[in-house]
Amino acid sequence: MLLSPFMAVAQTNGSVPVGASITATDDSPSCGFLLLLPFSTNGQAYKNVSLGKSLTAASGDLPWTSPSGEFAFGFQQVGDAGYLLAIWFNKIPERTIVWSANRNNLTQRGSTVQLTADGQLVLNDQSGTRIWTTPYLGGSRAAYGAMLDTGNFVLAGQAGANLWQSFDQPTDTLLPTQNLNSGAQLIAPYREKNYSDGRFKLILQRDGNLVMYVTAYPLTASNAYWSTGSSIGSGYQLIFNQSGYMYLVASNGTILNQVFSNPVSLQDLYLRATIDYDGVFRQYVYPKTASGGKNWAMNWTTLPKSIPSNICLEISFPLGSGACGFNSYCKIGDDQRPSCRCPPGYTFLDQNDVRKGCKQNFISQDCGHPSQETDSFEIQDMLNTNFPHTDYEIFTSVDEDWCRQSCLSDCYCAVATFMDRTCWKKRGPLSNGVTDTGISDKALMKVRKGNRTEELAQKKSAKKSDQSALIISGSVLLGSSIFLNILYVFFTNRKKQKVITQHHAMRDMNLQNFTYNELETATGGFDEELGIMYLHKKA
Ligand SMILES: *[C@@H]1O[C@H](CO)[C@@H](O)[C@H](O)[C@H]1NC(C)=O
Ligand SMILES: *[C@@H]1O[C@H](CO)[C@@H](O)[C@H](O)[C@H]1NC(C)=O
Ligand SMILES: *[C@@H]1O[C@H](CO)[C@@H](O)[C@H](O)[C@H]1NC(C)=O
Ligand SMILES: *[C@@H]1O[C@H](CO)[C@@H](O)[C@H](O)[C@H]1NC(C)=O
Ligand SMILES: *[C@@H]1O[C@H](CO)[C@@H](O)[C@H](O)[C@H]1NC(C)=O
Ligand SMILES: *[C@@H]1O[C@H](CO)[C@@H](O)[C@H](O)[C@H]1NC(C)=O
Ligand SMILES: *[C@@H]1O[C@H](CO)[C@@H](O)[C@H](O)[C@H]1NC(C)=O
C-alpha cells in the first residue's frame, strides 16, 4: 500500500517541528479568529463567485471556499502587521497558506478584494488604493470566479475556460496538479511568520534549467546553489502530479529529472511542496483525518529528500555570506534542518532574525601592538568546521600549535583552520561558515580573554546543542572514519561529492577557477544572470 514507505519516517520524525514556517496564525489561534474561519463552510453560495462579489478584511465575511471546503480564498491576519489576501488549507487548525497576492504589502482592517463587474480580481487597501490586481485579460472577460478543490483559484470565461488562475502565479508553494512553467519561480518567505519575499528562490529558467538561487536580499539573484544540471538544460515544465511525484519534463514529454518521487495517497493526506525560509525545498504531508492519517502525527511532516540535501555545504561562494549570515555558521540539526549559530566570541545581530548574522562581542586585536596583545587572546576550537573563501594566507607542513600561535600573534587573523598539517588564516567578516561531519578541518577561533561571564553563558548554551556533534566527530577521529565515509559516500549524490572534492582540492590554489567551475556546475553555464557575473569576475 502507498503509505508504507513513509511509516518509518513518520515514527522517527514524530517530534520534528515541521510546517512552522508556513503557519499563518499565532501559536494559539484565538477563538475570535476561528469563528471568522469556520472549519467547513459548505455554503453552496460560495462555490461560484459571481461578478461584483467582495470580501472585506476583518469584517466577519466568510472566505470563498472550494466545494469540499478544503481550500479557502480570503484574508488571513499576519500577527499585528496586517492582512494577506491568500489561499489556505481550510480544514486544518494551522490554516497553512499556499498562495498570496500581497506578501510584500500587507493591508489593514477594512481592505477589500472584489471580483469586479468587468471580471478582474482587485485588492484595495482600507483607503481604496489599489494594491494588487489580476492582469488585463485581453479581449476576454471573466464571467465568474471559483475556488477549486485543488487549491487553485480561477477566473473563468462564459464558456468555462480558465482566463486566469492562481496556480500560474505561485508564491512559495506548489500543490499537486500545479505545474511550474518556463520562467516561473517560487520565492521563499523571509522568515517564520513573515511572508515577504525572502532570501532564496527556485526558478525554471527559460534555458530549461531548474535552479535555486540565493537572492542577495533585498536585490536580485546571484549565487546558484542547486540545479538540475547542464546535461538536461532542456526542461520545459516542472510537473507535480496527483501521485505526489515531481519531475522536470522536456517539451516532448520526456522526463529529464525526478525532483521528488514520494508516492502519496491524496485521498488520505494533504500534500504541498514549499521552498522554506531556510532555502530548502521540501514536500510536506498532513493527514486529512485522524483515522486516515494512521501513523502520521496531526501536523505537517516532511517527506524524505530535501533539496538541496545539505544547504550548509551547498551555499559556499566567494561573494555572499553562505547559508547563514556573516560571522555565523550553519549546521544541520537533529531535526535535519539547517540552523544558524554564532561561533564563540560572537552574538546574533538580531535575535529575532538569526540569518542577519553575528557580530564580534569583543574589542579587536590592536595591530599597533600585536605582540603585547597576544596574551589577551585565546583560541577556542570548533571541530569539523570551516569558513571557506575567507582565507588570506596558507601554510603547509606546519602543526596545529604553530597554526594557533600564528593566528594569535596576527591582528588580521579572525580564525585559522587546520587540517592535514596545513593552516589557513582567515579574515572577517567570516562567511560560508559550516559545521558538518563531512568536514575534517578544525576551526581555531580567536577570541579576547576575560569576558568570563559572557563566555560562560555562551558555553553553557552552546554545550547542549554541540554535544552530539562532538560525540560524532570524536568517533570519526577514533577510527570509525572508514565506516562513516562509506555511509557518507552512500548517501551523497554525485554532484555533492564533486563540490566537496573541489572544496578541498582547489581551495586557495585558484579561487577564480573554483568559482567558475562551481557556478558552471551549478547552473550548467546556461544562465544569463550568471553570465554577467562571469564577465565581471574575469574582468
Ligand atoms: C505542529 O508543529 C508545530 C511546529 O513544530 C508545533 O508548534 C505544533 O505544536 C504542532 N502541533 C501539534 C498539534 O502537534
Ligand atoms: C458558475 O457561473 C457560471 C456563469 O454564471 C455558470 O455558467 C456556471 O454553471 C456556474 N457554475 C456553478 C458550479 O454553479
Ligand atoms: C518581514 O521582513 C521584512 C524584511 O526584513 C520587513 O521589511 C517586513 O516589515 C517584515 N514583515 C513583517 C510582517 O514583519
Ligand atoms: C504598498 O501599497 C501602498 C498603498 O497602500 C503603496 O503606496 C506602496 O507603494 C506599496 N508598496 C509596495 C512595496 O508595493
Ligand atoms: C506520477 O508520476 C509518476 C512518475 O513519473 C508515475 O509513476 C505516476 O503514474 C504518475 N501519476 C499520475 C497520476 O499521473
Ligand atoms: C525529447 O527531448 C529530449 C530533450 O530535448 C531529447 O533528449 C529526446 O531525445 C527527445 N525524445 C524524443 C522521443 O523526441
Ligand atoms: C562582555 O560582554 C558583554 C556582552 O556582549 C558586553 O556587554 C560587555 O561590555 C563585555 N565586557 C567587556 C569588558 O568587554
Image (tube, grey):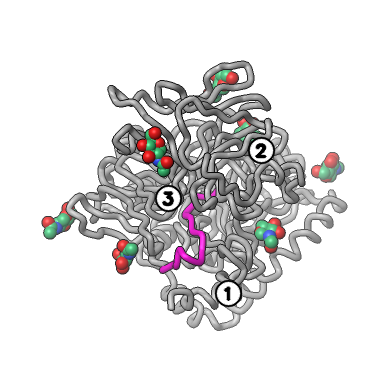
Pointer 2 residue: 78
- Is disc 2 in contact with disc 1, using a CB cutoff of under 8 Å? no
Question: Can you tell which quarter of the image residue 467 is in?
Answer: bottom right
Ligand 5: quadrant of the figure: bottom left
Up/down of 85 relative to 331, above or below = above
Q: Nearer the viewer, residue 476 or 70?
A: 70
The mark that comes first in sequence, 2 or 3, is 2
**Any part of residue 438 in sight:** yes
State the quadrant of the N terminus.
bottom left
Crowd tier of the residue under label 3, counting other residues whose Cα lies within 10 Å: few below 14, some 14–19, many 20 or above:
many
Q: Is residue 149 found inside the magenta-colored segment of the image?
A: no
The mark that comes first in sequence, 3 or 1, is 3
The amino acid type found where label 2 is placed reads Val
**Residue 225, numbered label:** 3
The amino acid type found where label 3 is placed reads Tyr
Pointer 1 residue: 294
Q: Which region is colored magenta?
A: 263-278
| Ligand 3 neighbours mark 2 (CB distance < 8 Å) | yes
Label 3 vs label 1: CA separation? 37 Å
Q: Report x, y in % for residue 448.
A: 77, 48
Q: Report x, y in % for residue 30.
A: 76, 45
Up/down of 200 relative to 80, above or below = below
Label 2 vs label 3: CA separation? 30 Å
Q: Report x, y in % for residue 517.
A: 33, 50
The mark that comes first in sequence, 2 or 1, is 2
| Ligand 3 neighbours mark 3 (CB distance < 8 Å) | no
